[in-house]
Image: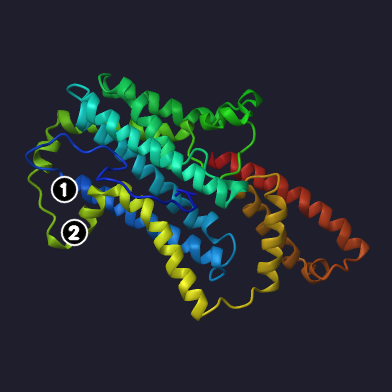
Amino acid sequence: MLSIARGAQTNTGPQVDLVQHTINHKRRITAIDFGRGAALVAMAIYHFTWDLEFFGYADPGLTTQGGWKLFARAIASSFLFLVGVSLFLAHANSIRWRPFLKRLAMVAGAALAISIVTYVAVPGGFIFFGILHQIALASLLGLAFLRLPAVVVVLAAIAVIALPQYFRSSAFDHPTLWWVGLSSAHPRSNDYVPLFPWFGAVLLGIAAAKLADGAGLFERMRSWSLGRWSEPVQLAGRHSLAFYLAHQPILIACIWLFSQIVPPSEASREARFTGACRAQCEATESAEFCSLYCVCVLDRLESEGRFAEVYEGRPSAETASRLQEIVSACTFDSEVSVEEEQ
């Protein structure tokens, strides 16, 4: 996540979806448009919270922990699942190369633009392989699975999702191979959605679409009407790339304007400590690791009543020794947590 992820995305374009339009010239499947639009709304909520954190209106690290972290992953998974569903609907009978390549080029072009913009804006955490990069690659690779039996596609999805849990190698540590997702260390990026394990969500979407099509579900869905209340969400779903690219600049601009009128309150000592810790940590480690690590250190110092000594730079010999133990323990715990989430 949804950090889907995190980071600013810009540019607008013609009416092109993050996922491909369904092959239905008579009537669209509005439920799929609604599902895509609902995922976009959820993504905007997450990014709005991240922006509040960035501007100092929310606690540091809020969106990288607990429910917010799960929320982000659910958003990214839903997008990629719908990539698989729509890929099957558009090309199950035969691959329509012209519209496929046109949409692929637009999504890949938008992904490249995001990489360039974020490299200029945040070079230490630029988006080199985020959700759009994954969608472009997954759309291409997914074509190879459209004719396979659903059970084979499901097994492939399980393998793709499980592999990073059991196999990582320094052979993938070179930056040119980070997109694979099997490096021994977690690369730094504001939005990192590598091939493994995220392509598995696309494969599950293809498998689900094959089963739904075999059961005649899509034909029944074409007659569904969700009511006028759902039309704004459906509209977003039909123009999802434009929504995706435009929403962060708009949110950031609105919060910046608000900050000029109502500046955020001065950060607490805890917030300043966490911010300084993360800034130092992220010079060598991933943002996910640093968020967990810095919160861990802060919590342990506070629980033992040692925070004031460390924050004010006057730790006793005992506290200095204990701090090293806390750092070692939090490093280990954070590494384990990151590994379990990958």
251 with respect to 328 (left or right): left
Q: Please, what secondary structure does the residue beneath circle 1 have?
A: helix
In the displayed structure, does residue 229 sit left or right of residue 205? left
Location of residue 320 by image quarter: bottom right
Instruction: Return the x and y of residue 86 as percentages of the image width and height.
Output: 25, 36
Q: Residue at x 35, y 26 (%)?
A: 140
Lower sequence index among marks 1 and 2: 1
Residue found at x 44% / y 43%: 113
Q: Quadrant of residue 213?
A: top left
**Residue 18 horizontal side relative to residue 76, left or right:** left
Q: How is the image coloured?
A: rainbow
Residue 26 drawn at (x, y percent) = 6, 39
Report the residue marked by disc 2. 230
In terms of depth relative to the viewer, which is nearer, 69 or 23? 23
**Residue at 32 percent of width and 53 percent of height:** 243
Q: Is residue 192 left or right of residue 269?
A: left
Q: Position of residue 199 (x, y in %)?
A: 41, 32
Tell me the residue that label 1 is attached to: 30
Q: Residue at x 21, y 45 (%)?
A: 32
Q: Amino acid at mark 1?
A: Thr
Task: Give how far across and how far down residue 281 sits, in percent.
Answer: 71, 51
- Residue 208 visible in the snapshot: no
Report the amino acid beneath label 2. Ser
